[in-house]
Amino acid sequence: MSDRIDSQLKQRLLPVIESQKFMHHLGVEITALQEGLCEMTLDYKEDLSQQNGFFHGGVIGTLADNAAGAAGATVMTSGENCLTAEYKLNFLSPAKGDKLVAIAKILKSGRSLKVAETNIYSVQGETRKHCAVALVTLIAV
Amino acid sequence: MTVFQPQNSNFEHVVRDSFSRQPFMELIGARLDVLKPGVCEIVVDRQRGLTQQHGFFHGGLVSSLADSAAGYAAFSLYPENSTVLTVDFKVNFLNPSEGERLRARSEVIRAGKKIFHLKGDVFAEKEGGVVHCLTGMFTMMCMLGKSDAPNLGRETVGSA
């Protein structure tokens, strides 16, 4: 698992990761971190569900946004702060499963604007289902 | 990339025929290049009438090309006796569309019964390289039982 995480990058981003209290509250884990890429994993718990027992759409949006933000932070200089300017999310199928995996990749890294794509999968045992996709614009401030 | 099975074995003819009946695509000189189940590529060569004030391809044109590629990528998976309509799209411009030719490529991410999700990208091709200019997401609807014939659902001009 650790070779999926660039330890120098993680070290540099640690203060920001640590200060993201909402992510800790949800139980989000960073499972891969490389230049221009971040993968986040979130285990299912009832607190995160909606009325059918699926992961709540808001949680999916949060994860899409946050994984993109972390991917964006990897391509920013240490003095820069990464903020989301906007995102658009499409739900592809109900997010039913033991966990959610969000994989964010930077598609374009401009001077101030970065564009990321996040794909979200719900994982149940061995099966992985593509449940959402987001396009995220990040701004370096 | 998911491999999709077409519902209509004649999809290539159906899609190319529909494309050839789009006056707007004809106006801009667009050509339907690659067509596979769930995948479509449309190209257009640079001409002055398609540019904006900096000489780049106009953003509206770049989006149109992506929209059209997405529509036909979805349409390639539709059953007989149906037509396609865009529900929504969101695009991000990544780089100025500067080049000799634009290529829009779209592929189906998820094929539902009625709603299809696609991703679309546009690349500017020029000597010495390719620039990724636009990326976006598209939602297409399958209008089952509606003909893809011209003037879909419109009153004919003059018919009081």
Image (cartoon, coloured by chain):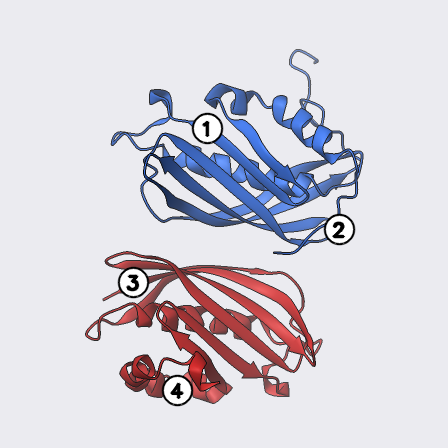
Chain colours: A red, B blue
- Say whether residue B61 is left or right of residue B2: left
Per the rendering, the mark at residue A139 is 3
Q: CA distance from mark 3 to mark 1?
A: 32 Å
Q: Nearer the viewer, residue A19 or B121?
A: B121
Say few, some or many: other residues with alpha carbon within 10 Å of mark 2 (under 14 / 14 to 19 / 20 or more).
Answer: few
Check chain identity for marks 4 and 2: say if they share one: no
Residue A141, given in percent of the width and then of the height, sits at 23, 66
User: Do tag 3 and tag 4 residues touch (Cβ < 8 Å)?
Assistant: no
Name the residue carrying label 2. B113
Q: Secondary structure at mark 2?
A: loop
Residue B155, given in percent of the width and then of the height, sits at 69, 21
Name the residue carrying label 4. A21
Which image quadrant for residue B22?
A: top right
Say few, some or many: other residues with alpha carbon within 10 Å of mark 3 (under 14 / 14 to 19 / 20 or more).
Answer: many
- The kind of residue on which mark 1 rests is Val
- The kind of residue on which mark 4 rests is Lys
Name the residue carrying label 1. B44
Q: Pointer 3 indicates a residue of which chain?
A: A
Q: CA distance from mark 3 to mark 4?
A: 21 Å
Q: Secondary structure at mark 1?
A: strand
Q: CA distance from mark 1 to mark 2?
A: 31 Å
B159 lies above or below B70: above
Q: What residue do we see at 58% from left, 36% from top?
A: B34
- The kind of residue on which mark 2 rests is Lys
Q: What residue do we see at 45% from left, 49% from top?
A: B135
Q: Pointer 4 indicates a residue of which chain?
A: A
* Outermost residue toward the left in this view: A79
